[in-house]
Amino acid sequence: MGLFLEWCSAVGQSWRDTPGQFGRFVYWLQRYNPDTPAYAPVRIFLARSG
């Protein structure tokens, strides 16, 4: 729960506004490093069709 709230803070959103973005949290969680601050940049590349 603490990591989820930390992530919400890092992305600048309330926990109430993030249910639709749970996949982003899981992505962040997979790359979580407790030795770096939560606000450390993580590059996310989205595949685009077309």
Image (cartoon, rainbow, N blue to C red):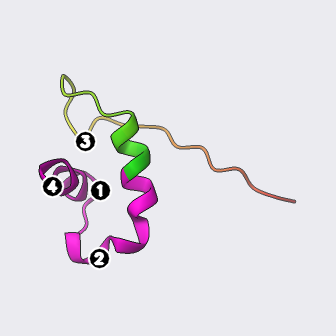
The amino acid marked with disc number 2 is Asp
Any part of residue 14 in sight: no
What residue is drawn where x is 60% and y is 44%? Answer: 45
Q: Which residue is mark 4?
A: 1
Residue type at mark 4? Met
Q: Residues within 10 Å of mark 2 (few under 14, many from 20)?
A: few
Residue indicated by mark 2? 17
Q: Pointer 1: what residue?
A: 11
Quarter of the figure that contains the N terminus? bottom left
Task: Categorize mark 4 by other alpha carbons within 10 Å: few (<14), some (14-19), many (20+).
Answer: few
- Label 3: element kind: loop
Of pointers 2 and 1, the one earlier in the residue sequence: 1
Q: Residue at x 71, y 50 (%)?
A: 47
Q: Amino acid at mark 1?
A: Val
Res. 18 image quadrant: bottom left
- Mark 4 / mark 2, whichever is N-terminal: 4
Indicate which label's residue lies in the foreground, 4 or 2: 4
Q: Secondary structure at mark 2?
A: helix
Find the distance from the CA under tag 3 to the CA under tag 4: 17 Å
| Dot placed on the residue nearer the N-terminal end, 3 or 4 | 4
- Badge nearest the viewer, 4 or 1: 4
Mark sitting on residue 39: 3
Mark 3 and mark 2 lie on one chain; the one further toward the N terminus is: 2
Q: Which residue is rendered at x = 29% and y = 56% of the image?
A: 11
Asked if disc 1 and disc 3 are in contact, CB closer than 8 Å, the reply is no
Q: Please provide the residue range marked out in magenta.
A: 1-25
The alpha-carbon separation of the residues under discs 3 and 2 comes to 18 Å
Residue 36 appears anywhere in the view:
yes
